[in-house]
Image: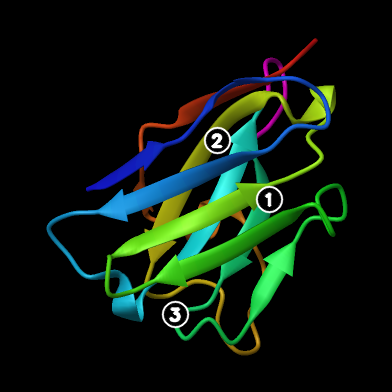
């Protein structure tokens, strides 16, 4: 089970840190992705990190503002979001898969991930 937390309402330019905690399995051997879905839009990949944390992807829209990290000791993955914009408003989901985002296949695609959290809402508004 994956459980996201840390969402909320923040003003433009503000920051939030999302957490994705796993229970029932260890994340050590899983690639993790953060995805988001805004109303009326398709779910999109925001950031993905390989199981070793050696490879990371960021969508162009968040590059330089968001940072993904993982703490395997805590079985948790984080998404630090800075300089938030209204267009970052969405439900944010984390997902895990042992067979996603690996060498030769570094695509951060929702269809590649099999285990999903329930999502956490992020609203960026003044």
Ranked by sequence position, the earlier of labels 1 and 3 is: 1
Residues at discs 1 and 2 in contact (Cβ within 8 Å): yes
Q: Is residue 68 left or right of residue 57?
A: left
Q: Give the residue drawn at x 39%, y 66%.
A: 97
Looking at the image, tell me whether mark 1 or mark 2 is earlier in sequence order.
1
Q: Which residues are magenta?
A: 38-43
> Would residue 106 be visible to someone looking at this image?
no
Residue 61: assigned label: none
Instruction: Give how far apart the Cα atoms at labels 3 and 2 are.
Output: 20 Å
Residue at x 79%, y 55% (from the top left corner): 59
Q: Quadrant of residue 107?
A: bottom right
Where does the image place residue 85, in percent across and percent down from the top left?
A: 83, 30
Circle 1 crowding by C-alpha within 10 Å: few under 14, some 14–19, many from 20: many
Residue corresponding to mark 1: 46
The residue at which mark 3 appears reads as 51
Residue 92: image tag: 2
Placement of the C terminus among the 4 image quadrants: top right
**What's the coloring here?**
rainbow
Q: Position of residue 102 (x, y in %)?
A: 55, 82
Which secondary structure, mark 1?
strand
Q: Residue at x 45, y 69 (%)?
A: 70
- Marked residue nearer the N-terminal end (3 or 2): 3
Tell me the distance, in whole angstroms, between the alpha carbons under discs 1 and 2.
Answer: 9 Å
Residue 8 point in image, percent of width and height: 54, 22
Q: Residue furthest top?
A: 126
Q: Residues within 10 Å of mark 3 (few under 14, many from 20)?
A: many
- Judged from the image, the secondary structure of the residue bearing numbered disc 3 is loop
Of residues 71 and 88, which is closer to you in this image?
71
Residues packed near mark 2 inside 10 Å, few (<14), some (14 to 19) or many (20 plus): many
């Amino acid at each position: 089970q994956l459980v996201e937390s840390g969402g909320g309402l923040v003003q433009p330019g503000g920051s939030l840190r999302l957490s994705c905690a796993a229970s029932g399995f260890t994340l050590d051997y899983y690639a993790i992705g953060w995805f988001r879905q805004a109303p009326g839009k398709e779910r999109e990949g925001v950031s993905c990190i390989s199981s070793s944390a050696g490879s990371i992807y960021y969508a162009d829209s968040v590059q330089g503002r968001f940072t993904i990290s993982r703490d395997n000791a805590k079985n948790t993955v984080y998404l630090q979001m800075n300089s938030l914009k209204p267009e970052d408003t969405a439900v944010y989901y984390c997902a895990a898969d042992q067979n996603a985002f690996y060498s030769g296949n570094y695509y951060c695609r929702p269809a590649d991930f099999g285990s999903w959290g329930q999502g956490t809402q992020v609203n960026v508004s003044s």
